[in-house]
Image (spheres, rainbow, N blue to C red):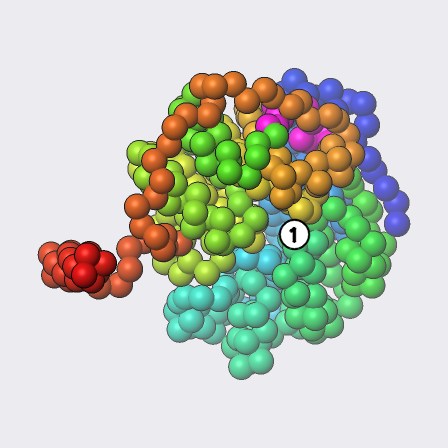
Amino acid sequence: MKTTTGGQKTSISMTHNILTETRFDSFDLTPELLQGLQHGNYEFCTPIQEMALPIALQGRDVAGQAQTGTGKTATFLVAMFKTLLSTPSGNGAKQPRALIVAPTRELARQIASDARQLGKFIDLKISLAYGGTGYQQQLDDIGQGTDILIGTPGRLIDFYKQQIYRLDCVQVVILDEADRMFDLGFIKDIRYLLRRIPKPTKRQGMLFSATLSYRVLELAYEHMNSPELVRIEPEQITAKSVNQSAFYPANEQKYSLLIGLLRTKNPKRSIIFVNTKKAGELVSAYLSANGFAPGVLSGDVPQKKRQWLLEQFQGTALDILIATDVAARGLHIPEVTHVFNFDLPQDVEDYVHRIGRTARLGSQGEAISLACEKYVYSLPEIEKFVGQKIEIMPMTEDLLPEIEKPVTRNPRWHGPSKGTTGAKGRERVRRVRQKSTAAKRA
Ligand code: AMP
């Protein structure tokens, strides 16, 4: 495997302006593809695009180290379209010619949305297969034949086993967020799919991952055709473009500090990361009791509700989102001004992913971590990984206001309990409360 690493030029351009001077129209692309790029306002390449496209546009395999926010999606989509447009399909049956596998449904949907934008003027059908919702609709759509199939492993395999589509016509295969596929236990499924598509020498393979760890590289060696490694080092992304700081609160000061920070910083749009679903419940309850209206996103929030929350967050209806790592992975949320690590993550890669939500494509963002007694021990490792010291800020009085405690003893993770809304529901709650107060008095 050959390696191309971001050199001096890349790190300079990322510091001051995350776009490089390389223009998309300097590549040999078809007019429809250039039109799609123009339509999506893509003019200059990001560093990963500048480094990976010259290789991938020749039809060669690429294993890229890049996280969400670097422009990796457009990198593999542009290369995929170019390969599909310059290679005869060789099948009249409308079987998938490109297969894109992503670890989460949000990421799969985001990729499909970017592909539809870039491929707006290209006559290739794009279909989605992801779990949790829309089973029959997806099945019917794919069953009618498609060119580009994007999905999460479980649903892709389910439809494959039912012979809804075939894998023998695949000319381009893309694995996005490969490291996350391992974390989420999808690796067996990935191997299942990779073993059923044509051999590495007969198709183009692209793999992107936040880290090119040993296990990811092993997968690349096994299933790709001498891939070239393209790395954008995490510290080049995080250290330069995100303003990072931390506080050392005691465990019991965390809610007050978070509320103090939200009040003083007054962020336009922020994500508060927590390590557990339970912590998310509590943060949500505390914020609600103190005049904020956060949305909460965890892995077990139903799909419909997630989509609704994201739409609210992408618009102006919701400006604070509380999330766990699993739920937030791969989501594209534009213009997040602040990331708060209510809990410092225990995994350094999660830290990079979290703070990568802010400062996308050149905008300056702020990441503030509450390094409490429980999780502070991950700080040295994080500093080593991002290659810089994170400034510790003093906890001034204005940052530790008196706060209201949540009224509910049992704050719920998302939304009110069943049967507690509407006039009848409220009446029921009132009766239950009355009864319990009466019981206490007695
Ligand atoms: P990604 O890293 O693929 O999640 O991309 C992050 C965001 O940047 C997406 O909204 C893309 O549409 C956008 N983007 C990617 N590359 C470029 C580019 N070269 N110029 C402008 N926007 C871009």
Q: Could you say which is closer to the camera, residue 269 or residue 410?
A: 410
Left or right: residue 80 versus residue 215 is left
Span of residues in magenta: 234-247
Place of residue 241 in the rendered image (x, y in percent of width and height, measured from the top left): 63, 24
Residue 117 in view in this figure: no
Q: Ligand 1: does it lie within 8 Å of the C-beta at label 1?
A: no
Q: Secondary structure at mark 1?
A: loop
Place of residue 308 in the rendered image (x, y in percent of width and height, measured from the top left): 35, 50
For the residue carrying disc 1, how many other residues have a C-alpha within 10 Å: few (<14), some (14-19), or many (20+)? many
Q: Is residue 193 above or below residue 100?
A: below
Place of residue 216 in the rendered image (x, y in percent of width and height, measured from the top left): 77, 55
Left or right: residue 259 versus residue 346 is left
Dividing the image into 4 quarters, which one contains the C terminus?
bottom left
Residue 247 in view in this figure: yes
At 36% across and 55% down in the image, what residue appears? 410
Instruction: Give the quadrant of residue 353.
Output: top right
At 36% across and 58% down in the image, what residue appears? 304
Q: Could you say which is closer to the camera, residue 400 or residue 330?
A: 400
Q: Indicate the amino acid at tag 1.
A: Glu
At 39% across and 28% down in the image, what residue appears? 402
Place of residue 172 in the rendered image (x, y in percent of width and height, measured from the top left): 67, 58
Q: Is residue 402 above or below residue 118?
A: above
Q: Is residue 118 above or below residue 201?
A: above
Q: Could you say which is closer to the camera, residue 358 or residue 259?
A: 259
Q: Mark 1 — residue?
A: 177
At 60% across and 37% down in the image, what residue appears? 372
